[in-house]
Amino acid sequence: MQHASLETQASSDASPTPLPEAAGQARRFLRTTLTGWGLDGLVDAAVLVGSELVTNAAKTGCRQQMTVAVRHVSRTTVRIAVRDGSCVLPVLIRASPDEECHRGLTLVDHLTGGRWGATVEPAGKVVHADLTTTR
């Protein structure tokens, strides 16, 4: 029966305004969705990952539509994906200890065990990150 409930709760999408406040909108969306799915233990990591992906999309100059999606891609994996209208791909930069920026994707990489990536589309890109559930 648990498998059936995952099927009915398989995905959810939101379209935050592609501005700096989009990160807050994405955090609220992810928190609400994952809590509703009973995945409370994943909320903190998902909120951080989603916030970083949305912030990166906003920083690339995307002023077009942005979509945040969360989906069960397998029984033990939840994927957070951010689609935006910019073709600028994210780059993992190892920040020096004194740098005050360039840490976002390092956090995403750590929290996902390196399971993230980007796909170029005709009108932008999708950046995704996979988190492991305990269910």
Image (tube, grey):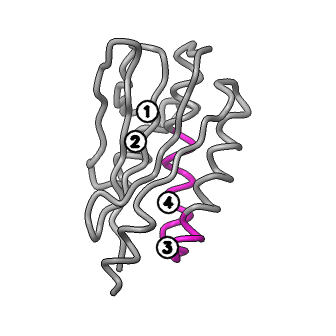
Mark 1 against mark 3, which lies toward the viewer? 3
Mark 4 against mark 1, which lies toward the viewer? 4
**Left or right for 24, reference 106:** right
Label 4 belongs to which residue?
45
Q: Position of residue 61 (x, y in %)?
A: 57, 13
Q: Which residue appears at 41% of the width and 46% of the height? A: 108
Label 3 belongs to which residue?
39
45 falls in the magenta region? yes
- Give the alpha-carbon distance from disc 1 to disc 3, as whole Å: 34 Å
Query: Are the residues tagged 2 and 1 within 8 Å (C-beta)?
Result: no
Mark 3 against mark 2, which lies toward the viewer? 3
Q: Earlier in the sequence, mark 3 or mark 2?
A: 3
Q: Position of residue 40 (x, y in %)?
A: 55, 74
- Give the alpha-carbon distance from disc 4 to disc 1, as whole Å: 23 Å
Label 2 belongs to which residue?
106
Q: Give the residue type at disc 1.
A: Ser
Number of numbered discs visible in the structure rendering: 4
